[in-house]
Image (cartoon, grey):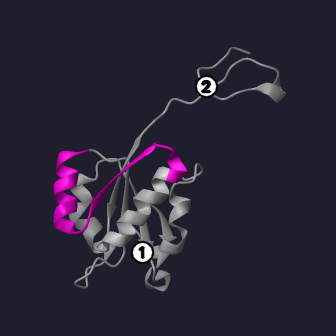
Amino acid sequence: MEPSKTSLELPAQQRVFACEPIAREVLYIDDDPDDLLLVRLIASRAGRGAFNVTGALSLAVALERLQNKRFDLVIVDNRLGSGQRGLDALEALADRLGDAKVILVSDYMQDIDPATLPGRVAGVVSKQDFHKIFDVGWPY
């Protein structure tokens, strides 16, 4: 077996997996600054520097951030204040998202019908489960 870039050739029980540090660029869109602070804290602890979280407290700011920077992951609150839904915001942001994965978060999971989610939404997470977004197994 040829050695790969991601593993050292050792006996199976001693195999070590090396990984290059990859900083994922994350845009978090929410009208609540406390939630932004919480997401930054969770990301810094979970990822040990693997996530750079940029916040946008409004759709206008999100549009500006997406114009100036490429993101790997965009997390959108489903209730953005002033009656605006995260899904509606995604429509406004669609042409600027590039190949970013999207995760929708909400305190009101009953408001979300999974059958109506656009294909680019990789997941829906309750705000109580923010930490799951930054777990290694997520598909982004």
Tell me the element at label 2.
Answer: loop
Give percent across and percent down for residue 38: 43, 65
Q: Earlier in the sequence, mark 2 or mark 1?
A: 2
Residue 6 is tagged as 2
Tell me the element at label 1.
Answer: helix
Give percent across and percent down for residue 49: 46, 43
User: On the rendered structure, is 6 left or right of 27?
Assistant: right
The quarter holding residue 6 reads: top right
User: On the rendered structure, is 58 left or right of 36?
Assistant: left
Quadrant assignment for the N terminus: top right
Q: Residue at x 51, y 44 (%)?
A: 48
Q: Nearer the viewer, residue 115 or 62?
A: 62
Q: Is residue 73 above or below residue 110?
A: above
Residue 68 is tagged as none
Q: Residue at x 48, y 33 (%)?
A: 21
Q: Is residue 62 above or below residue 10?
A: below
Q: Residues within 10 Å of mark 1 (few under 14, many from 20)?
A: few
Q: Is residue 106 above or below residue 51?
A: below
For the image, the number of numbered tags is 2
In three-dimensional space, the C-alpha distance between marks 2 and 1, rounded to whole angstroms, equals 39 Å
Q: Nearer the viewer, mark 2 or mark 1?
A: 2
Q: Amino acid at mark 2?
A: Thr
| Residue 63 falls within the magenta-colored stretch | yes
Residue that numbered label 1 is attached to: 116
The quarter holding residue 74 reads: bottom left
| Residue 89 falls within the magenta-colored stretch | no
User: On the rendered structure, is 110 left or right of 16?
Assistant: left
Q: Residue at x 49, y 58 (%)?
A: 42
Residue 121 in view in this figure: no
